[in-house]
Each structure stands twice: as C-alpha cells, then as structure tokens.
Image (tube, helix red, strand yellow):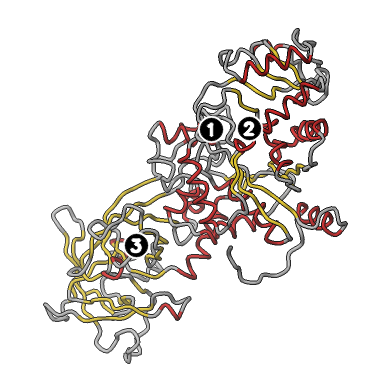
Amino acid sequence: MFTEEKKEEKSLNFLEEIVEADLQSGKYTQIITRFPPEPNGYLHIGHASSICLNFGLTKKFPGYTNLRFDDTNPVTEDTEYVESIKNDIRWLGFEWEHELYASDYFDILYNFALTLITKGLAYVDDSTSDEIAALKGTPTEPGKNSPFRDRTVEENLVLFERMKNGEFPDGSLTLRAKIDMAHMNMLMRDPILYRIKHAHHHRTGNNWCIYPMYDFAHGQSDSIETVTHSICTLEFAPHRELYDWIIEKLEIYPSRQYEFARRNLNYTVTSKRKLLQLVQEGYVNGWDDPRMPTLSGMRRRGYTPESIRDFCDRIGVARRENMIDVGLLEFCVREDLNKKALRRMVVLDPLKVVITNFPEGVTEMCHSENNPEDIAAGVREIPFSREILIEKEDFMEIPAKKYFRLAPGKMVRLKGAYIIQCDDFVKNESGEITEVRCSFIENSKSGQDTTGINVKGTLHWVSAAHAAPVEIRLYDRLFSVEDVSSEELDFKEYLNPDSLHVITGYAEPALLDSNPGDSFQFLRKGYFAADAESTAEKPVFNRTVTLRDNWAKASESK
C-alpha cells in the first residue's frame, strides 16, 4: 500500500458519506468492495478512477477490497489480460485481499439458475435473438410474452441440463428470467440469464458450454463474497433493479449496488472495442503504445502512479458525467516529476558553437544540480570543451524584441558553465547558419563567478566531443479533436497525424546512466522517460509531457 503526504481535510464524497453512515449505524462492522474487470483488454485511465475509488474506500474505512475477474465471455478473454490487469493495479499502489474469478462460481451460479427455474422464475426459450428483440417492446410500449414462457418447471429443468451437456448449438436456446414483459424498465422484461457458447475458457477449458450473462453473474458473485458496497459506473444504474430482484428471489446475501458517474477525458477514447481496433489495425504499436490511454501505455510514457492517483483524487466522485480536460492529467504528472525527476541537458535540434578562446583538446568539468527541488539528489559532472551544441532556436541573427538568447554581440550563460558572447557566425551556400563563434568570459564559471556581469538568458548545451546520440520519441495527443466519443463519428478519422515524431537528440553523458522507466527533465524541453526498449547501445527516451501546456497555446493561436 502507498503512503501520502498529509493533505487538508476534504469533505466526504457521496459514497464515503454512505459508507460512514452504514458503519455508524452498525449495519456493517467492516466494508467489502471489489474491482471487477473483464479480462478482455488492458486497463485504461478510466479504470484508474474505479480502482482508486474501490481501494480508497477500504483504505479510509475498515474493510478490504477483492480483485474479481468477470470472466464469463470466453471468446474475448485471455490470461495475458489477467496478468496485465494485476500488474497495473500493483503499479498504481494497491493490493487486493483475494484474487477471485466469476468462473470460480460457475457451479454455484448454475445451481442458482436451477433454483429460479424450480421457483417458476426462469424458463428456457427457443427464440432467436431477433425474435426476442422483436417481442421486447419499446420504452413506451409493453413487450409480448415469448411462446415458450409457460413451459413447465420440469421441461425447463430438462432443457437447461441438456444445454449444459452441450446438446444444442450456439444461440439456439437461452435461459431467461420470468419477470414482466410490460415492465417500465426494459431490462426487467424477461432478461437473458444464460446463453450457449461453445468456446474454450482461459481457466475452465471446455468444462462449460453455457455461460451466465453479466447481470446474472455480477450480483450473485458480489453476494457470494459478501460485498457490502458494489460500486459501478452510472450506465449500470438501470441494472440495479434486476441486481436486487435476483438476489431477493434467491434469498442470498443482500449485496447493494451504488453508481457513480464516469469521467470522460477529452482527446481520448477509452472504449475497449475502439482501443482494440487501434491495436489490431496498426494505428498504434500495441496496448502499451505511449499514446494509448492504457495504464501500461502511460507507464511506458513516463507517467507515475502518484500522478495518476492525484488526478483521480482531483476529479473526485460525482453523480453526473462530464468531460475532464486532459490538461489536468498533464498538470498532475508535471507536479510530481518536478519533485523527483533528475535534470539532464539534451539538445534536440543542434547548432555548433565554437568557443574560440577556449583551448583545443581540453576538457573541463562543470557541475550542476541533479534536481533543484531535492538537495539530496546531489550534483553531477558535465564535460565542457571548445565545441558545444546548442538548440538552433537559441540563436537569432537579427534578434526580436525581448529575445534574451544568443545573438551577435549578445551574452548568455551556459547552464552550470560560463557566460559566452557571440562574436561571429557562419552560413552555408543556402544561407543556413551552420556555426556560431563565441568567446567565454573568464572568471564567470557558475558557482565561482566574480565578474559581476548579469545576463538574462541561460541556455542548455552539451559538449560536442562528449555528446551521446539518443533516440527521442516526441509523443503528443492521439486525437486532434476534443470529443471523439460519439458513436456517429469514425474516430479513426480524427487521429492526430503529429502524435509521434522520432528524432535524434544529443545528450550529456550522465543521461546514459539510466534504466527503462527512469524519468528525467530535459532542461527547457520537457519530461522524458527511458523506454522499455532502451539499451546502453541504443538509448531511447519518450516524451512524457512538455514543461508547459503547449497544446492549449497552439489551439488558441488557430
């Protein structure tokens, strides 16, 4: 479990108020929550809110949280997803009490179904899916009873057992609850409880060819585990009536469902179907592509678990859905990395600078702090020599007003090193500046400066002789429009063509002392993380986030 710095006391959200009231009234002595992902894809930022909520409640109040995989659809589920989900939850900083699977309860759920049949509350239906839909009615018109609704208990028991024994093909029969085809809640109009699906299950193999629907497995699994507060997103609110009905008719432990509103993130899709499409059709390089909103993708990009937990805490828990600005998420990671990321100098678009009064063949060691926010991080040595590299944008032949970087006759400080003055520059035949010639000011070395000269600009740089070439992957938002959630849109048409640029940067030697996942602030450029593919022979760094919200500025200028 993680520990956090003490924060100011916050008022309870509505779910915390419910839990506190239940504990104070003596309804429960402890609470039990669960996080119930379906193992059919990787977890994304939307799941992080649910994880933080469920585990956060049992961190704040007495009790525990289970991890239960809702593995009732063998066609889409895989152990790869199971392992990724467990890794992501632990990476976020949480540990579950019990690792459980809905498939653990297949025998129990089957017996629950037999109980409903015996009570005359469920029946086997031969209708096709189209026929069932046609009899469903509309929100303003009642449905019609299936012609198989009045089968006897004995006939239903025999047919259901034959379904279990594999005597019927997929889709030929279903088990439906017998409730009310005129019910105002259309989910209560004889919902399907079991369907036939001859498919290999990642845990039970070929033992079963009938599988419970979500609405039949979910509430009963909660009840088996004595979950006190079953927390779902708002789209499951209409399902609560069925959740309660089945529990009541089975006379089992009365777990209770509560709903909160999901938070949609702009410039992002979190539909597993759409994310899977991006992966399968090659728009991204796998589930952990750093442009993906998956936790594995965000981890690879350099997001920290602390920043994601902070983001989830800031957006809070509410009863109404709304759109959250991804800029808040980026703010959270900047806040966290500013405190912990080591500083390094990397030039992304190099321009050679020759310091004409510095001796050739000599290397002098300069020093700079690893992180000004953390004194304990210490200092590092940086080699300085006659030829250095700076960013092309840091030199201007004819400087604009209030341009405080390098220009003819102008002085700047090199971070951790000397003040230099531009004396001349060289152009090629195309008129492009290829070299800048400067002189350094003696006695102006950082930390030892006795010149009294004040300059307004400080540049990052690397020694040309010691610069290490590294691959830099400049990631940006995956979509170019704010809201791509509408099903009427072809979301792929709005992919941002500039979501990835790969360039070569030139780094100070200290950057090479890194491992995959290590985070750094490249001075004046942003926060970057060593990629999972990074090696000593081929260092690769992913841009996590810029130092400032450049996207907002670009949008305002359009």
Pointer 1 residue: 204
Measure the C-alpha gap from mark 1 to mark 3.
39 Å
Q: Residue furthest left?
A: 361
Q: Which residue is mark 2?
A: 106
User: Exactly how many numbered labels are in the figure?
Assistant: 3
Q: Nearer the viewer, residue 519 or 85?
A: 85
Residue 452 placement: quadrant: bottom left
Q: Residues within 10 Å of mark 3 (few under 14, many from 20)?
A: some
**Which residue type carries mark 3?**
Asn
- Amino acid residing under circle 1: Thr
396 vs 200, left or right, is: left
Residue 378 place in picture, x, y as percent? 39, 80
Q: Which residue is mark 3?
A: 515
- Against 388, residue 246 (above or below) is above
Q: Identify the mark nearer the N-term, 2 or 1.
A: 2
The foreground one among 47 and 125 is 125
Position in image of residue 95 (x %, y %) = 58, 56
Q: Is residue 418 left or right of residue 137?
A: left
